[in-house]
Amino acid sequence: MSIRDEFIRHGVVVIPGAVPGDVVERCVAQLARDLEHPVVQPESGTPRGASLSDPSTWPSGTARRVIEVVAAEEGTHWRDVRESPKLREALDTILGEDAWTVEANVVDAERGICEPRHWYCPVTFPEGNEEAKAAALKAKAIVARAEQSEKRRKVSGASGLCTPAPAHWTECDSGNVRELRESGHDWEDIAKMISTSETIWTANDCKAHYEPAWAPEHDAQLMALVQAYGEKWQTIANAISSQRPGCTKAQIRGRAMMLLDERSPNMTDDAHNVSVAGPTNVLDPGTSWHPVNRRRMLNRGWHLDIGAGFDTDWMRTPEGHPFQGAIILLFLTDCAPGGGGTAFIKGSHRWVASYLRKKGGVSHQNVNAWAIDLVGELSSKGRLPLSYEMDKHEAENAMSRDDIDGVIEQVSGQAGTIVLLHPWLIHSGTSNLTADVRLLANGMARVKQESFDAHGISVLKEVQALEPKLKRETDFLPSTCPDDQVKRAPPDNRLPKVSVICPVHNAARWIDETLASVCMQTYTGPIEVSIFDDSSSDGSASIIRRWAKAFARIGIKCVANGSRWVESANFVKEDAPNQGIGFCRNRCIGQSTGEILVFLDSDDVMMPNRMELQVPLAVEHPTAIIGGGWERYPS
């Protein structure tokens, strides 16, 4: 695959040895001086007085670990970077010969400003010498990702800005659930008892968070298993299941991370005669890093680079902007895995292309808010694993099965390596869990105005021709959120009543899209949706209940029941087994009241005119079964 094809398809191109070692050394020498005595004043909240040669001056505790240095053009080293033959050849291939430019910083030393800032150098300091901080960071990541998975996102139709639901499960909630469950209450009662007027919890929410108290002997056994198996959490979960039946892998991992954070390295637990290895024997930077923003907030650093001179309120459009040709990252120090290298999602620029095409134009700050929410949602659903959680071959197979939407990777390499990123690629900073400071220079190649006016940016046009492999995007559905659905006109009762038969089993990944496609039907007669939940255990029930309320609000009748729904006439028991698609579909038919049945599986979506086309045929041929075509989406 050529460099250009790689840039268009994956959004990332790595160029080893692009800048000679002596040039890198001169860049680093200037950054060391500017770090101690900045020419351009750093933003507020940035730690001051750090020296690369004196670790005692490095940020610690709660201080942010990234200091941005804006270097003035001095000597010839920055010019040598811009004129690197390997960089120029790559940009010629990607953006076109004589179609681009890489500008130099112009610094006003007296005023301490640089406008616009064409290059800046983020210096990422280590989290700390003791790797227990790595364990703490990882524990926080697990908790954050688990919390995100509890609440689906709400998409605003006006701006496309995604914001998380306000409710968050707390330790207090966990304690209340444990106390109530051990007092003999059932899950539905517990859910009602801990819910408030502002926060409604379901029985499934309570079951998912329920965790019996950990006894000292359980902790000792867990630490012994961690020492033996490292981060093989499923193996550990299987081994401890006899002592703690029903305890999930996430709960076990979270408990282990908490214990590792509390204990000092190589501490011996005399009470149980178990030697407990500290985190240095379990965690290594390459399998412990997580995406963070500059203030070390987990999963909040995802963004698109803006380009010098582009305002955050300006619109990002499908046509792009001449200020945004290609992002340039230059390693000024060696960067090993876990050493603070940039995290990225290969192919995510295609998601942005689809989003911008659908919206027409979105402000830069709202695109970044959307990116943060999108990556958070997909991560919480397990559809964006970190690269060390899944080997390359396994990830490729999972992608081909549509089990995941991508992999969060981290760039690493030797000093002098240049990485080119597509201007729409979603990327983030990461935690630096090594003992070394990471130095990076970040710039943006611009497209010359005359080239932009004449030809646009071809690598943007060609990206838009590629279908994004992302299940969240369904172009003909304006929104897949129940609360965003629009009230329908009163039905024409002269037309037949149609019942949509929708059997459900563990369809939380798709059911929003499925039911949103019902709302988009152009058929003007009365519509009823008949849903039966056949013992789902993935939260489908709570999603269906939200949709039932939405259907009632917009004028579509909905009948929804389930074999594990305590309030349902079809309730069997809380752990009722799945009975299969035939049973489930027959339940849907039995509770429906329509003259015509339209079958819709819970992992399918209907085109908007399906009923409008098929119902007249069914009326004209009352003894016939009306079929139709289908296609995989995305293809």
Image (spheres, helix red, strand yellow):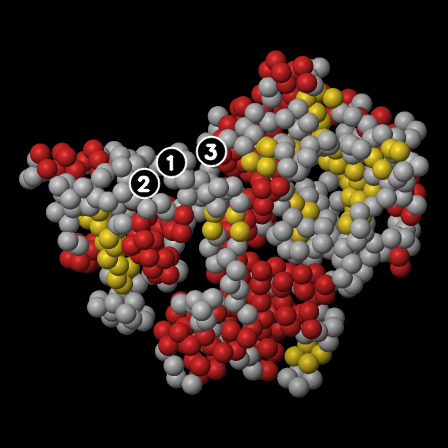
- Residue under the point 17% across and 54% down: 592
Q: For the residues marked 2 and 3, what is the alpha-carbon distance in whole angstroms?
A: 17 Å
Q: Point out residue 263 in the picture as x, y percentages from the top left corner.
A: 70, 74
Q: Is residue 180 above or below residue 574?
A: below
Residue furthest out toward the left: 623
- In the rendered view of the protein, which quadrant contains the C terminus? top left
Task: Name the secondary structure under disc 3.
Answer: helix
Residue 33 in sight from this viewpoint = yes
Instruction: Please identify the quadrant where the N terminus is shown.
Output: top right
Q: Earlier in the sequence, mark 2 or mark 3?
A: 3
Give the x, y percent position of residue 117. 78, 34
Say if 301 sits above or below 29 in the image. below
Q: Write down the residue under mark 3.
A: 358
Front in this rendered view, residue 611 or 492: 492
Please give the name of the residue rendered at 71% of the width and 27% of the height, measured from the top-left corner: 445
In this picture, residue 611 sits left or right of residue 543? left
Mark 1 in CB contact with mark 2 (< 8 angstroms): yes
* Image coordinates for residue 251, horizontal then vertical, percent: 53, 68
Identity, as a three-letter code, of the amino acid under mark 1: Phe
Kindly identify which residue carries mark 2.
520
Q: Residue at x 64, y 22 (%)?
A: 94
**Occupied quadrant, residue 333:** top right
- Mark 2 residue element: loop
Q: CA distance from mark 1 to mark 2?
A: 9 Å
Q: Earlier in the sequence, mark 3 or mark 1?
A: 3
Amino acid type of disc 3? Lys
Crowding at label 1, few (<14), some or many (≥20) Cα neighbours within 10 Å?
A: few
Residue 82: horizontal and vertical position, in percent?
80, 26
- Numbered tag placed on residue 476 in the rendering: 1
| In front: label 1 or label 2 | 2
- Viewer-proximal residue, 395 or 69? 69
